[in-house]
Image: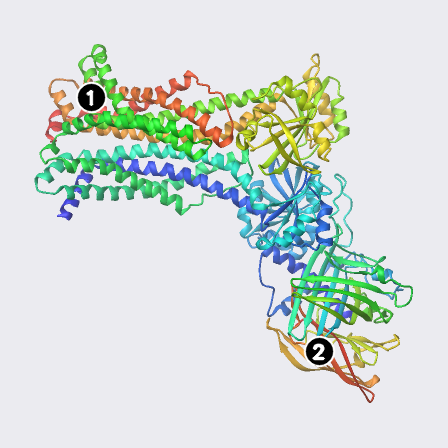
Amino acid sequence: MTTALSRASLGYLLRHPWQLALALLGICIGVAVMVAVDLAVESSRKAFELSMDTLTGAATHQVIGGPRGVSETLYTRLRVEHGIDRIAPVVEGRVEIGGTPVHLMGVDLFAERQFRVFSLDVENDPGSTDLDTEALFSRILTDPNAVLMSRQIAGKLGLGVNDRFEVRSAGGYFEGELLGIVGGDASASAGELIIVDIAVAQEWLGKAGWLSRIDVNIPQEDATLRHAIEASLPAGTQLLEASGRTQSLTEMSTAFMTNLSAMSLLALLVGLFLIYNSVSFAVLQRRGLIGVLRALGVTRQQIFTLILSEGVVLGLLGAIAGVMLGIWLGDYLLVLVSRSINDLYFRVSVTAVTVSPFSVAKGLLAGLGATLVSAAIPAIEAASYAPRLALSRSVIEQRSRRIVPLIALMGLCLGLLALLLLRVSGSNLVAGLSAVFLLILGFALCVPISVRVASAILAPLANRLGGTSARLAVSGIGANLSRTGVAIVALAVAVSATIGVSVMVESFRGSVSDWLDRTLQSDLYIAAPGGSLDAPLIAQLTGTAGVEAFSTSRRIWLESPEGRIRLIAIQLAAGRHPRLELLDAGPNEVWPAFEAGEVVLVSEPFAYRSGFVAGDSITLITNAGNREFLVGGTYRSYDVNAGAVLISRAAYDLFWDDPEIDSIGLFLAPDARADDVAERLRTTLQVHPQVVMRSNVEIRDLSLKVFDRTFIITDVLYWLATGVAFIGILGAMLALQMERARELAVLRALGMTPWQLGGMVTAQTATIGLLSGLAAVPLGLIMAWVLIDVINRRAFGWQMDIQVSWQVLAVAIGFSVGAALLAGIYPAWRAASSPPALAMREE
Amino acid sequence: MPLTRAILWIVAIILVAGVAVTRFLANSETVPAAGGVSQSSSRLAELLGSQRLEGFPLATAPRVFSFPQDHGPHSEYRNEWWYLTGNLDNQDGRRYGYELTIFRFSLVPAPPGESEKAPSSAWKTNQVYIAHFAVTDEADNKFYVAQKYSRGAMGLAGAQADPFKVWIDDWSIQENPDEVTNLPPEETWELTASGDGFSLMLNLASIKPAVLNGTAGLSQKSAQAGNASYYYSIPRLRSAGSLQIGDTEHSVTGLSWLDREWSSSALADDQQGWDWFALQLSDGSDLMFYNIRKTDGTQDRHSAGTFIFADGTSQHLDRDDVVLTVTDQWQSPQGAFYPARWNIELPDFDLRLSVSPVISNQELVTTVRYWEGAVDVVGRRGGQALTGRGYVELTGY
């Protein structure tokens, strides 16, 4: 019996290859999108962590100093006086080779071996064998040009062993020579690292006398050793756990990754609708067959089992194909994701997707699960019919009509639940995301009733505009709710995602642009990337004719109990207050107090994360140890780095022994011609190639370019979601029209011309598109609001003004109608061209 | 010992550096073990082949030694070492031996110049230091080893003549300011070194003056001119201090021996390794002899030594003055066969000695593998029985 049933099922599916293909395609694409995003995010996260590991190596702790780092003499003292040898010095920074920024790591090879293992990759490099390892070692120590790189970065820079190249760094231009390729285990994680001797790093980075940090390996929390180190550290220097430092960097990027995961969940959601749509259709189509089987004595149990087993097979096939497609797609997404991370946080290089079994299993499970649920609902229904009733489609529609209000009620409840969750969950990101999905689900459940109401309202209108066939088209949507409802929901959710994301990105961009305008007040900015400007040069630059006033800034990292803090010391231009937007204090009180060094300001993301408000005090590590500073207010900032604290230069000089200045902002006299002044400055800078001058406009444009690049991934994701929805609606339209073939044939037999019939089908799909688009608008706006005020705020602490342009909404609705029309072309052609007699005979 | 030892040490040092790099660049846990000898030699020949010596001064003529200046570094030469070995007893008569060796070598002849573009880094150097520290515990049949590497910059490692100090991290041999007297002996030093679970602090005072080995301190290693080193020894340093093993601290006393050598020369292709003996005898005399072995197993004719009389005067020994016979062998856990007992005869002095290791396993499995250990001596001089203690070094096995 079972074999016979299986044969019946298989036979049916093979006779309807379109349905089989659609169901499989639906499952496949739904799973693929989810797997692709998941893999891309996971792979870049892994690469990020690996890079951090390379930097940290076997270090359990790190000795961190003040603004300039750790004095190198401390390292000697620890070794020679205190006999601590589980330590290694590191000098690191950014340099550019051929315009490409790379991370330069200066190490002492003798001490280094306890921490990081760089194996020398000679086997694939015939060019490198002419230097034996011993000679290479000697050259690394004694050659001021010696550089080691991973194969990856050497390939990227187009360099081979023994090639010489120019290195641009804070200290100026230097000549480097690639002595060897670092390979083996470390090569994957060495990524964008280039390795030089510590002496070379100090000179190139202009850090003579200083170390970026001292790596420490304390075995199994050897308390004696830890205390010995702590006891010998001077004030302003601290011993921190390496994992903690890595973590704070990782946390920052996690917020970004979470945002991406949210996008992938969105894709999954659309994918689930798609799966549901295709699978339930494949079942419903067969109610005739099921009715016959029941009449032949097949039990409900058997019918249910049959449909579910079919679901398992379909789900497995589709999900496996989806996973493979997802892995392929993930490669492309990965490039985008890792580029965003590079722009925002840290240089990582990821070359290939790491296929994690977890992601694959998740994709398979989701695909299979969704298929089973999608099959189970109609299966229960089909199995529950009396044999006779199962033959009639109208019964299904009657039933679904009865439960539509119930479903809508459920949707309302879900929506309310989502709002409640948002209110009570504080700043929890996961709860925020959960609320978004509850909201979408709730909304989706309300769509069928809205469609019914809308089609009821629109039908008379259509009758007046387009006559009977138009009325039939529109009321048909309401009458076939079990089909059309799902299609509309799928399209609406996809379109609303485009609205939500567009509005979010647009609002974000607007706020960032506004913030840049406020922040970039000076006309010209001069900086030494990665280094500092020396006093005589500053005097010369600021004394240039046409320069009226100037401000200076110095940005350093401080370790604090709240994590890494970006401390920005600024000297305001005389008589000018920054136009930074203060969120909880008045500029007239704050700026004088700030200049006097009485208060510091905290950035909004920092305040959001650590809960600081005006009047609190914040502990910062100074040269004389920890000291409390009064917080004067919070300023708006879209700095990606978690926390920024603004301090006046006067106060900075008092507590930190660091005369360096990173950049200066020049204000031009009102009557000065900007081009002339810039020309004069450029002349001065000719002998300082490492110093860069940019106008405020250039910086603004550059920043926005990076911003836009970051959101390419977002764009790509919502196009994917939309693509999924399009396939969904195509499937739904096909299904709908094919189901109605007999009905349409009757209309043809009653005298409707093929043109009229085609027009009717087209009108119906257009209406479906319109309804989806209309439904998508409120949902999209809610999503935008949630993305802006909940997700971004919770992830980054950013706050932005919501900006909705009518173009975004119009485009979304237009897209929705267009997609529906496109999807309706084939069904319309088919409906119009099939001979009525044939279609009627089908039953 | 000069020649061979120097040559082999040069080789060793370069190997240490080389292997060190290779090791941490290649992350291999194993040191070239069995068969490492031939591998090392061929490697050495390769390494020491050609241009490497260019630019380094060679030891070609005798020089005037003066102290304390010559206790300090001779950085223009490619390699140099401070080599302290000694036999110690604790308060209960328990027997120990120790070795603390600090090697210096120049990677390239010229120290790095000042940077033209940026403030110069204090880490720049052409000097590298490597040190080995080992302790032998006879009663427990234990041998403890530790090693260190460092660049000779930033005060991390270095050497200076006045006040005398040579150090790497917190291991050091330096003038002991509390003990400085104007009375001979002139050298009053302090030694500090520690490994994982063992450490030594010793006060050293020379009871014999420095002895110049070879021809007035020029020690010829092979027939080729310049293939020589400058080599002196302080054969007897009274030693007292404390030795810590595990949680137990022992106060120890005994005798130490200092070997000092610097050169830029290389090992000849046909030289395999050396056996070096430094023996302090109960009648007040001391014997140093090194036996250079050729790759064909025969004794190199540049093998030589020095006999130091109780009054501190000394006499150079040629290969023909000493008859060395191996009477036992020992196979190390690494697989190498080392000689493990010797008879030494000096017919001209009517001296016959039998030398045997205090414990068998005193092999240093550091980046360069060699055997260096405390030995006991029994024998006769003329009609008189005598005893002694000393250190033996065996390389190239």
Protein chain holding label 2: B
Residue A195 lies left or right of residue B375; in this view the side is: left
Whole-number angstrom distance, CA of label 1 to CA of label 2: 108 Å
| Crowd class of label 2 (few under 14; some 14 to 19; many from 20; radius 10 Å) | few
Can the viewer see residue B164 in this picture?
yes
Quarter of the image where the C terminus of chain B is located: bottom right
Residue type for callout 2: Thr
Residue A298 lies left or right of residue B228; in this view the side is: left
Protein chain holding label 1: A
Dots 1, 2 in contact, CB < 8 A: no
Q: Which residue is mark 2?
A: B298
- Disc nearest the viewer among 1 and 2: 1
Compared to residue A17, the image places residue A422 above or below, namely above
Q: Which residue is mark 1?
A: A476
| Crowd class of label 1 (few under 14; some 14 to 19; many from 20; radius 10 Å) | many
The quadrant in which residue A359 appears is top left
Q: State the residue in front, A535 or B1.
A: A535
Residue A843 lies left or right of residue A80; in this view the side is: left
Q: Secondary structure at mark 2?
A: loop
Residue A701 place in picture, x, y as percent:
57, 23
